[in-house]
Image (cartoon, helix red, strand yellow):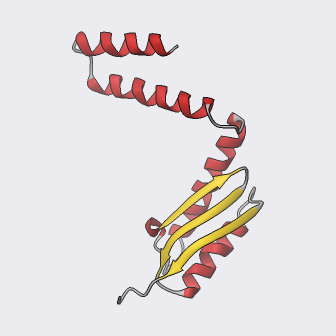
Amino acid sequence: MQRILIILLCTSLLSGCNLWLAAALGVGAAAGYYYKHDSRSFAQINTDQNISAEINTALYRQPGVTPSKIQIYTYNGKVTLEGTVDTEDARIRALDIAKNTRGVNEVQSSIRVVSPYN
């Protein structure tokens, strides 16, 4: 499979094919590698990605929470939140959102409260 992708990539580059096609093939190969080396099923990986996306979307709807400062990692329904927020209230709201998201079994937090004035 990898040989086929390499041949397609080289052929497309040598023939003047669109660089975006070559990039897409590379991304597809990387995704295949990722799924092959993850112990979760494809369905579980998809579920975990959906959980992270749902939490991220809900965080964007919360006033006083800056989602770009919070990283969300989900593995088998276990969510880990890392990053910083400006207030304790924002930290609590982020945790509540994660805990109340469908499919979440457990939430761990490494969110730190950092004053925006420091």
Position of 25 with respect to 34 (left or right) is: left
State the image quarter where residue 5 is shown: top left
How many numbered markers are drawn? 0
Residue 11 position (above or below residue 27): above
State the image quarter where residue 32 is shown: top right
Residue 57 position (above or below residue 12): below
Q: Position of residue 96 (x, y in %)?
A: 68, 75
Residue 46 position (above or below residue 52): above
In the picture, which quadrant includes the C terminus?
bottom left
Position of 1 with respect to 19 (left or right) is: right
Q: Position of residue 24 (x, y in %)?
A: 39, 27
Q: Position of residue 44 (x, y in %)?
A: 71, 42
Residue 65 position (above or below residue 8): below
Q: Nearer the viewer, residue 66 or 118?
A: 118
Q: Nearer the viewer, residue 63 or 85?
A: 85
Q: Residue sitting at 42 percent across and 87 percent down? A: 115
Q: Residue sitting at 34 percent across and 23 percent down? A: 21
Q: Position of residue 61 (x, y in %)?
A: 53, 70
Q: Residue sitting at 35 percent across and 16 percent down? A: 9
State the image quarter where residue 68 is shown: bottom left
Position of 60 with respect to 48 (left or right) is: left
Residue at the extreme right? 105
